[in-house]
Image: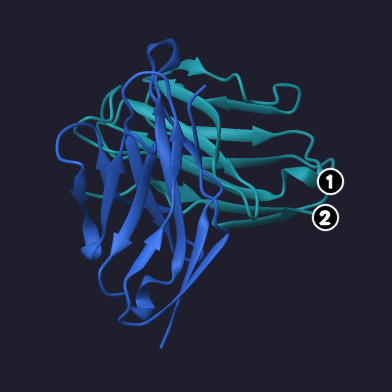
Chain colours: A blue, B cyan
């Protein structure tokens, strides 16, 4: 079965510093990987995806993610964190079992950016 | 384009009562999903529709949960009777096709259910 793991419940970073939110995956076949962000009392917003091609994927709000096949990781990164980046971040993987695609989500990582 | 609409935003009920949630996906989106997000956990798929047909309800507790998408557009999710452990945010999502290659899932803002 396809799955993703987010090993950190919370990540704390100072504003202006680089941030990394970790995700590892377990899939059979080629992975389709995604990052979503959730602000309080809101639904999930798409940030970026990796399907094929360049291992460094750029997304919304200055975020990027690096796909690493040998380490089965897809870490989310940003060179300079903003206080407004504070939110809940979810890594997800496509599960195409049965011919219909769905997303399997990790447990989430809370990012806190301090002024 | 208008996003995925969900109502109500919040609902508080007592255990053993029934409740219904409504979702209107983005116009033209054939695939509709209902996810359950319990506090501190990632969203878990409950049911997936392709147009008006169910294609995956393996995680739906069918003894108490039901869902329909009669005309292949909007959808309702019902819980009857509710249990304390059903307290969660119920998220609706839609996608224009069966794949995620060109378009990711679009989520509504969810309905927060509290069962007391």
Q: Nearer the viewer, residue A69 or A16?
A: A69
Q: Which residue is mark 2?
A: B116
Q: Is residue A6 above or below residue A16?
A: above
**Horizontal and vertical percent for residue A46?**
32, 50
Dots 2, 1 in contact, CB < 8 A: yes
Name the N-terminal-most of marks 2 and 1. Answer: 1
Q: Quadrant of residue A67?
A: top left
Can you say which quadrant of the picture contains the C terminus of chain B?
A: bottom right
Give the residue drawn at x 27%, y 75%: A80
Measured in 3D between alpha carbons, the distance from the residue under mark 2 to the one under mark 1, in whole angstroms, is 6 Å
Res. B69 visible in picture: no
B87 to the left or right of A11: right
Q: Quadrant of residue A20?
A: bottom left
On whether disc 2 and disc 1 are found on a single subunit, the reply is yes
Res. B84 visible in picture: yes
Q: Secondary structure at mark 1?
A: loop
Q: Is residue A89 above or below residue B18?
A: below
Give the residue drawn at x 45%, y 50%: A90
Q: Which residue is mark 1?
A: B15
Residue situated furthest left in the rendering: A53
């Amino acid at each position: 079965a396809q799955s993703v793991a987010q090993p950190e419940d919370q990540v704390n970073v100072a504003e202006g510093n680089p941030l990394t939110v970790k995700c590892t995956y377990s899939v059979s076949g080629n992975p389709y990987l995604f990052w979503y962000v959730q602000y309080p009392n809101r639904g999930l917003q798409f940030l970026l995806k990796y399907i094929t091609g360049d291992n460094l994927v750029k997304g919304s709000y200055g975020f990027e993610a690096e796909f690493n096949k040998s380490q089965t990781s897809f870490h989310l990164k940003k060179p300079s964190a903003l206080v407004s980046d504070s939110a809940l971040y979810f890594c997800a993987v496509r599960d195409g079992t049965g011919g219909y695609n769905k997303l399997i989500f990790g447990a989430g990582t809370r990012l806190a950016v301090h002024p | 384009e208008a996003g995925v609409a969900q109502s109500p935003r919040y609902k508080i009920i007592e255990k053993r009562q029934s409740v219904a949630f409504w979702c209107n996906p983005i116009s033209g989106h054939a695939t509709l999903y209902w996810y359950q997000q319990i506090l501190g956990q990632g969203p878990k798929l409950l049911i997936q529709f392709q147009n008006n047909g169910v294609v995956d309800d393996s995680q739906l507790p069918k003894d108490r949960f039901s869902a329909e998408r009669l005309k292949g557009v909007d959808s309702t999710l019902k819980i009857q009777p509710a249990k304390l452990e059903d307290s969660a945010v119920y998220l609706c999502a839609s996608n224009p096709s069966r794949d995620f290659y060109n378009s990711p899932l679009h989520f509504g803002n969810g309905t927060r259910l509290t069962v007391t």
